[in-house]
């Protein structure tokens, strides 16, 4: 921009060049630091264990895919495929339920007036102060009493009522004009039909932001399955991956194998991020700026 | 007499012979309104059921549990404040609390200052590839904490990337003096992108015209930052600090997986274990009352900080 030859003030150009270089160098440094560990992951996944110890920082001299074949076949392979499947199944079900609950409750609060609305909403918002972790001891006791420990349902059903998701949906729906709903009602559409055929499609942007937020949080969750699940057949990949090397290599960590696994579970997230960048970032910062 | 009157009116109106079209539409409208009155509850019900069953009730139970001794098998016994007293006098709990304090305070300065500086840099007209930089700086947030910790083990192991690049021999993952700094490094790397986009969103609240007016009035860059940008960014900065506080107190994955040792499952050593480990250890050790008390102590800290933030925000209005 400041190298524009038609710049009417050429002397300002030289004065601006120094700070401009500083700013751009800072950004370059930040981007390098941000990306470099990803390169370490990619390079390491293509190295043999001996090359990783000799050359941890640079690109592989002789790239090999043997880490991936080791990871995805034989006994580590059966664990990996199983837990990957578990992760996908659990995260998909959880996200679907959570988004649906958020959308419905958000609609209930945004476009209806009912007794106790204000106090109920305030209570829900206030509950955001209490972190989920507070409930883990009592939930563990409850779930062990009802035989939910070590199941899929303990990973899918609890926690689907997300107040943040409900709040995001409500804020978006409040901004919708009432006339849309009135017009559909005049045409004889039932409330549920209005909700599913008109409101949900209009709210696609906010619902996808909630979905991305929920999906990534659940996909990455480590604490909940660590506490609530203890058999390999039901564990998500986030719990099995850190242990996989010990099973394959007899209690010695094979970092190349770990890096291959990390790459495998990170690439889908990167693709999703590249495609849904806007809603990921807007979802991440929801609530950051008061409107 | 008075009480019988409505019952007489009711059937007359409902089943009465003269049903004019006007009456029929009135009735339909009333039925519609009735359904309208229930509709909001029906929309909210699934959410509320899930919320009450898996959040509200367990919270109450957890609070009660923190005053009891419960091993999961024999009936719980009321012990008053014994759990809290045991925790506060236990050296492991104190160490864990100190560790979490470290994970909160040490990364905070580089996180906030770095993210703010980067947001200002991307926002400034001097940045050449701002639209490319934004997602790239955010990108460490995309990787899951588990993968991030595993990758950073390779970065920080004895024959790892950092030692190789800078010719060091630091035991980042074993040396008791270094392990917490390693966790802090990981936290800064993964966290900065998030605060960066938060600050970037906050900076959109600073109107360009105001900055121009300030510079026309002779304010230099520092004065513009101090007197124009900072006051407008205060709510965003407070928000970021509170979120950082809450996230730090709940920290679990990063230290345990980064410092998990060669079997990955051992978790962080006591000198670097976060507060969350006290809760998890209480559960695995069958001391549910102790675990609940640790959880509520954790909540108290979070509540205090959140209330301070609300206070500060309200003063502003």
Image: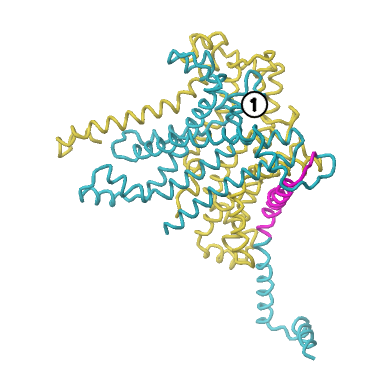
Residue A206: x, y in percent? 53, 49
Does A197 sit left or right of B287 as displayed? left
Point 57% across, 27% down: residue = B147
**The residue marked by circle 1 belongs to what chain?**
B
Q: From what the image shows, is residue A74 above or below residue B98?
A: above
Q: Quadrant of residue B254?
A: top right
Q: Nearer the viewer, residue A40 or A107?
A: A40
**Quarter in which the C terminus of chain A is drawn:** bottom left
Q: Is residue A45 above or below residue B34?
A: above
Q: Tell me where the magenta segment starts and ends, as one range.
A: B42-71
Q: Residue furthest right?
A: B74
Figure label count:
1
Task: Find chain B in the image and tell me its colour.
Answer: cyan
Q: Quadrant of residue B265?
A: top right
Q: Which chain is yellow?
A: A
Q: Quadrant of residue A18?
A: top left
């Amino acid at each position: 921009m400041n190298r524009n030859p038609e710049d009417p003030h050429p002397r300002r150009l030289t004065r601006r060049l120094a700070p401009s270089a500083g700013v751009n160098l800072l950004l370059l440094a930040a981007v390098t630091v941000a990306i470099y560990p990803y390169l370490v992951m990619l390079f390491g996944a293509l190295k043999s264990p001996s090359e990783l110890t000799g050359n941890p920082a640079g690109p592989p001299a002789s790239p090999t895919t043997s880490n991936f074949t080791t990871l995805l076949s034989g006994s580590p392979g059966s664990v990996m495929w199983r837990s990957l499947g578990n992760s996908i199944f659990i995260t998909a079900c959880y996200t679907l339920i959570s988004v649906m609950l958020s959308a419905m409750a958000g609609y209930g609060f945004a476009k209806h007036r009912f007794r106790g609305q204000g106090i109920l909403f305030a209570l829900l918002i206030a509950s955001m102060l209490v972190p989920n972790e507070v409930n883990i001891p009592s939930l563990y006791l409850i779930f062990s009493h009802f035989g939910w420990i070590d199941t899929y349902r303990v990973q899918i059903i609890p926690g689907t009522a997300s107040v943040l998701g409900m709040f995001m949906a409500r804020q978006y729906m409040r901004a919708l004009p009432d006339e849309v709903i009135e017009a559909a009602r005049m045409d004889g559409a039932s409330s549920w039909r209005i909700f599913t055929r008109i409101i949900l499609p209009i709210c696609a942007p906010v619902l996808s932001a909630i979905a991305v937020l929920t999906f990534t949080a659940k996909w990455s969750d480590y604490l909940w399955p660590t506490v609530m699940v203890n058999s390999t057949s039901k564990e998500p990949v986030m719990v099995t991956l850190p242990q996989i090397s010990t099973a394959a290599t007899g209690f010695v960590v094979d970092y190349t194998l770990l890096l291959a696994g990390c790459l495998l579970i990170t690439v889908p997230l990167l693709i999703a991020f590249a495609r849904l960048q806007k809603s990921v970032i807007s979802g991440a910062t929801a609530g950051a700026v008061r409107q | 007499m008075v009480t019988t009157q409505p019952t007489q009116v009711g059937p007359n109106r409902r089943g009465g012979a003269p049903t004019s079209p006007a009456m029929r539409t009135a009735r339909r409208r009333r039925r519609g309104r009735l359904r309208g009155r229930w509709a909001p509850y029906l929309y909210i019900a699934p959410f509320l059921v899930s919320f009450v069953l898996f959040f509200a009730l367990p919270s109450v139970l957890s609070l009660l549990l923190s005053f009891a001794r419960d091993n999961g098998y024999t009936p719980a016994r009321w012990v008053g404040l014994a759990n809290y007293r045991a925790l506060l006098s236990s050296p492991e709990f104190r160490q864990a609390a100190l560790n979490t304090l470290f994970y909160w305070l040490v990364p905070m300065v580089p996180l906030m200052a770095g993210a703010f500086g980067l947001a200002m840099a991307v926002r400034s007209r001097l940045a050449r590839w701002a639209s490319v930089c934004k997602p790239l700086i955010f990108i460490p947030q995309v990787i899951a904490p588990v993968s991030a910790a595993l990758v950073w083990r390779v970065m920080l192991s004895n024959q790892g990337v950092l030692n190789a690049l800078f010719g060091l021999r630091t035991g980042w993952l074993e040396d008791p003096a270094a392990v917490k700094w390693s966790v802090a490094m990981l936290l800064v790397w993964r966290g900065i992108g998030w605060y960066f986009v938060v600050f970037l969103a906050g900076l959109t609240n600073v109107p360009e015209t105001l900055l121009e007016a300030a510079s026309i009035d002779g304010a230099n860059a520092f004065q513009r930052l101090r007197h124009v940008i900072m006051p407008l960014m205060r709510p965003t900065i407070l928000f970021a600090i509170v979120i950082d506080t809450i996230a730090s107190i709940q920290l679990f994955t990063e230290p345990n997986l980064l410092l998990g040792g060669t079997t990955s499952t051992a978790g962080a050593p006591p000198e670097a274990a976060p507060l969350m480990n006290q809760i998890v250890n209480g559960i695995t050790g069958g001391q549910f009352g102790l675990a609940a008390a640790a959880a509520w102590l954790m909540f108290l800290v979070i509540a205090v900080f959140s209330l301070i933030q609300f206070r500060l925000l309200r003063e502003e209005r």
